[in-house]
Structures are given as C-alpha cells and as structure tokens.
Amino acid sequence: MKGRGKGETTIPVSKWIPDTLFQTIQKTTPIPCVDLIVLRENKKGSLETLLIKRKIYPEEKKWCLIGGRILKDEETKQAIARQAKEELGVSVKILGPWDEETPFAVYNDHRSDAQKHFVVLTFPVIITKGTISKSGPEFSEAKWFSLDALPTPLGFHHKHALAMFKKYTRKNRLSGTSI
C-alpha cells in the first residue's frame, strides 16, 4: 500500500482489481479482520501484551495490536497465522478457552478506523516459534507492556479491547493454558 497525507485514504496497490474499485468496496462494505492480543508472562507472573507503534496512516504513531484483513477464501486460523508471520515474523497459538471459531471479542465500530468499517475478531495468542521483528512495513517499534501500564495513545478500538481482556483475566484464570 502506498499512503497519502494524514487524514486521507491509503491507496492499495492491487494486482487483482483496479484501485478505484478497491476504494469503493472499502468505503461501502464492512471488512472482516483479526486482531491478536499477543501475550506473555513476565518474571513476576504478570501478563504482558506486545504492541506495535504504527508508522502508517491511519493511527500513525499510536500503539496498536497486530492484525489485519481476512483474505478471500482464508479461514480465520489462516488469517491469524499469516498476520503473526507477516507482521512479527513469529508463529502463534490461540489461548484457551478460545479458538478460531470462538474469539475473545468481536468489534463492529465504523468510527474506529478512518479508512473502513471493520468487523474484527479478537484473539488472545502466545508466541510458539520465532523471533519478534523489531520493525516492519506498518510499524516502527514492537514492545511488551504490562496490562496494568499500557502506553498512550492506543489506536483504533484497542484501548477498549485491552481493558476488556484485563477485566476478564482479573475475574478468570486462563484455563488449560500455560503462558
């Protein structure tokens, strides 16, 4: 994708359909996406989440979860694996009690993304293989944060998603999982 200035739509570079058609679809149709709450347990036994600092529009310079679109003919599990590999260079596993058919949360907030109306499935995951990329095409930095000390500003709907997850973990233990 190549971007324009702040406040303008990102122009996709498409090999399948003309960019103007893609823009029309993006502006008129909800886009299915996945977000990953990448987790680890620190030395004190507290949960930390990995956030990226975006370097592209929208939400430039804000801390965000990793995630993105579910592609045509792609299963949710495949989208999760692809996003983790493409953005971070790692493999992940969904934490129970959730699975690819039962996300932690579903967000449908047309105001949260200036480019599109998304419907996003949010999954807590742990890294199972690989070394985290320090930067990528969409982000300048990746960093671990305690769920009790999240940075600001957080992009998209991610402040709400992380607050809900923190509330859940306070009430429940993550069953059958060792982080």
Image (tube, rainbow, N blue to C red):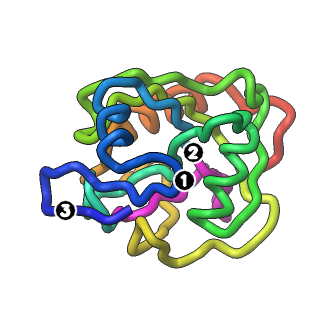
Q: Is residue 45 magenta?
A: yes
**Residue 46 in view:** no
Task: Return the residue at label 3.
Answer: 4
* Mark in front: 2 vs 1: 2
**Nearer to us in this view, 90 or 116:** 116
Q: Earlier in the sequence, mark 3 or mark 2?
A: 3
Instruction: Tell me where residue 110 appears, x and y as whole percent.
Output: 29, 25
The label nearer to you, 3 versus 2, is: 3
Q: Is residue 174 left or right of residue 57?
A: right
Q: Residue at x 52, y 36 (%)?
A: 33
Q: Report crowding for label 1: few under 14, some 14 to 19, many 20 or more residues within 10 A (C-alpha).
A: many
x and y percent of residue 12 in the render? 37, 55
Whether label 2 touches label 1, CB < 8 Å: yes
Q: Is residue 94 visible?
A: yes
Residue 126 is left or right of residue 177, and the answer is left
**Residue 90, x across and y down, in percent:** 71, 65
- Residue type for callout 2: Ile
**What is the C-alpha distance between the residues marked 3 and 2?**
29 Å
Q: Which residue is mark 2?
A: 37
Kindly state the secondary structure of the residue where label 2 is placed. strand
